[in-house]
């Protein structure tokens, strides 16, 4: 891995900010490629000729799953060939529906971020109607950390979300 140091400065400022950017070399060994070939163990829950889905080792929610192509593509999925891009989304949908059924989730959200591992992947995150974001609090309470108009609006949205979730579960 090569690390580059880039200095940013504003013409009217006397300060400079340095940022380190890491560029992955094509010679580096990709952990997802190792999982796809079976060289590195994983908890596989789906596999076909072109794709594999396995449980995330650092899940944000129970059952969080990663869907990857067996062939290495960079993490910016929009650069994948269109056919493979469409296929990975179809596999993620199939896996998501299986996860919903198996673990009782109301839905599975898909995230295509491409920030941590330089290998195309879709993150499947299970959610329930009652799963609240960190900003939501019980009805009647406002966000303690934010007193702005936006914070009050977020509190109102969260209250409505909770009320709708409770009404939908009865």
Image (cartoon, rainbow, N blue to C red):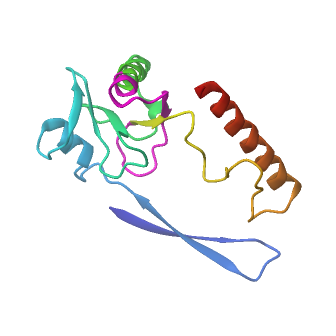
Task: Looking at this view, name the residue that lies furthest to the front.
Answer: 170
Task: Looking at this view, name the residue that lies furthest to the bottom.
Answer: 14
Q: Quadrant of residue 158?
A: top right
Closer to us: 79 or 121? 121
Residue in the picture at 19% in, 43% down: 42
Q: Is residue 40 above or below residue 18?
A: above
Closer to us: 69 or 9? 69
In which quadrant is the N terminus drawn? Answer: bottom left
Q: Position of residue 149 (x, y in %)?
A: 88, 54
Residue in the picture at 22% in, 41% down: 33
- How many numbered marks are there? 0
Task: Looking at this view, name the residue that lies furthest to the left.
Answer: 39
Q: Is residue 133 above or below residue 99?
A: below
Magenta-highlighted residues: 98-121
In which quadrant is the C terminus drawn? Answer: top right
Residue in the picture at 59% in, 44% down: 132
Q: Position of residue 137 (x, y in %)?
A: 67, 52
Task: Looking at this view, name the residue that lies furthest to the right.
Answer: 149
Closer to us: 34 or 46? 46
In the rendered image, residue 115 lying in the magenta stretch gets the answer yes
Q: Position of residue 52 (x, y in %)?
A: 25, 30
Q: Position of residue 118 (x, y in %)?
A: 37, 47
Residue in the picture at 58% in, 27% down: 169
Q: Quadrant of residue 151?
A: bottom right
In the rendered image, residue 13 lying in the magenta stretch gets the answer no
Relative to residue 113, is residue 138 drawn left or right? right
Q: Is residue 29 above or below residue 119?
A: below
């Amino acid at each position: 891995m090569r690390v580059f140091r880039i200095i940013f400065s504003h013409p009217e400022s006397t300060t400079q900010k340095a940022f380190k950017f890491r560029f992955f070399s094509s010679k580096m060994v990709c952990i997802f490629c190792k999982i796809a070939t079976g060289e590195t163990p994983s908890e596989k829950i789906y596999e076909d000729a072109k794709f594999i889905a396995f449980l995330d080792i650092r899940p944000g929610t129970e059952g969080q799953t990663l869907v990857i192509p067996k062939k290495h593509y960079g993490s910016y999925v929009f650069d994948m060939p269109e056919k493979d891009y469409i296929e990975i989304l179809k596999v993620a949908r199939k896996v998501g529906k299986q996860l919903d059924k198996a673990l009782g989730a109301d839905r599975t959200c898909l995230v295509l971020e491409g920030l941590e591992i330089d290998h195309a992947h879709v993150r499947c995150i299970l959610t329930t109607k009652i799963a609240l974001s960190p900003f939501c609090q019980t009805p009647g309470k406002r966000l303690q950390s934010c007193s702005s108009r936006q914070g009050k609006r977020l509190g109102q949205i969260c209250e409505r979300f909770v009320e709708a979730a409770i009404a939908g579960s009865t």
